[in-house]
Amino acid sequence: MNELLPTKDLGQSRVRIPGIALALWVLLLLGSILLVPILYRLKVTWLWIGITMSAVNLIGLYILFALKVADQWEKSVVLRFGRFTGLRGPGVFWVIPVVDRIPMWIDHRVMVTPFSAEKTLTKDTVPVDVDAVLFWLVWDAEKASLEVEDYRVAIAWAAQTALREVIGQMELADILVGRARMDRDLQKIIDERTTPWGVTVQSVEIRDVMIPQELEDAMSRQAQAERERQARVILGESEKQIAQSFADASLAYRDNPTALHLRAMNMLFEGLKEKGALVIVPSSAVDTMNLGGLMGVTSLGIASEKLDHPLQES
């Protein structure tokens, strides 16, 4: 968890030497070296040659440490004898070496900070691991440098504390289905805490919610049982509809015996169509259907044979 939190940036007060200042210092140093033989030919004393070289080198050192360049997205905090004197940048600006100090360079771009909460109990006492991402930017560089020791670390810890607080106020089901609500609540809480530091929170996004493996297995079994229950309900409804259709058909056949006879003959005919099929029909049923006894059944069998082999000649 802690690896997601930024550590204090020990290099933010480090002396930054821009390339242009270094180039000017090198040119002045080389110029002073090339100036020695010229002054010697002009019969200038070594004392004045040394003074001239020292002056040129001092100018080069002044340019090296006094000339600063801030990028388009940066502001530098300038302290003079430990007191805040203002913000410099973006672009080229000058400071007084030894007297002025730049403790911090403030980046005004949108920053991304990942943070997480591990083994945090929800309202219904379920331990969860939650990963999130915070998008923020510095809108007041003076407050960010003077009101808090390290605003990056402070923002990360404030975000993690707010995440634990929100998780503790919600049940697991709400966390799993209500990520948008969590995002809004987190943004509001973190923004209230970071506004005094000159920082505003643009958005918070929950990346992942991880629950214990045994609970995940139990939820999976519950979901499977629910799907099986729904399948059984659908099957029962289908059986009910089929039974209702049979009931309606029985009523129709009761009022129309001829239709019942035709249906019975059709079922018998379909059974005899199968090759090698043997159908035993009670004599009472044959008499009821008026099939003419055994000859009628035989006729149905011959008819089915002809239908199965229409091209065969006897």
Image: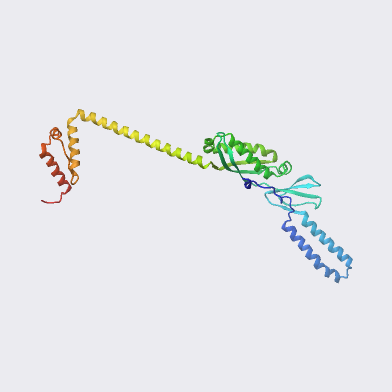
User: Which residue sits at x=52%, y=38%?
Assistant: 176
Question: What color scheme is it?
Answer: rainbow
Q: Is residue 264 above or below residue 49?
A: above
Where, quadrant-wise, is the N terminus in this rendering? Answer: top right
Q: Is residue 247 above or below residue 296?
A: above
At which x and y percent is residue 63? 78, 57
At which x and y percent is residue 182? 57, 37
User: Which residue sits at x=40%, y=38%?
Assistant: 228
User: Which residue sits at x=58%, y=40%?
Assistant: 119
Specify whether 254 is left or right of 198: left
Q: Is residue 64 above or below residue 274?
A: below
Specify whether 80 is left or right of 204: right
User: Which residue sits at x=81%, y=61%?
Assistant: 57
At which x and y percent is residue 28? 78, 62
Q: How many marks?
A: 0
Q: In front here: 94 or 233?
A: 233
**Residue 189, image quadrant:** top right
Specify whether 165 is left or right of 212: right
Q: In front here: 18 or 215?
A: 215
At which x and y percent is residue 111? 63, 46
In this view, which residue lies farthest toward the front?
A: 214
In this view, which residue lies farthest toward the bottom?
A: 41
Q: In front here: 107 or 250?
A: 250
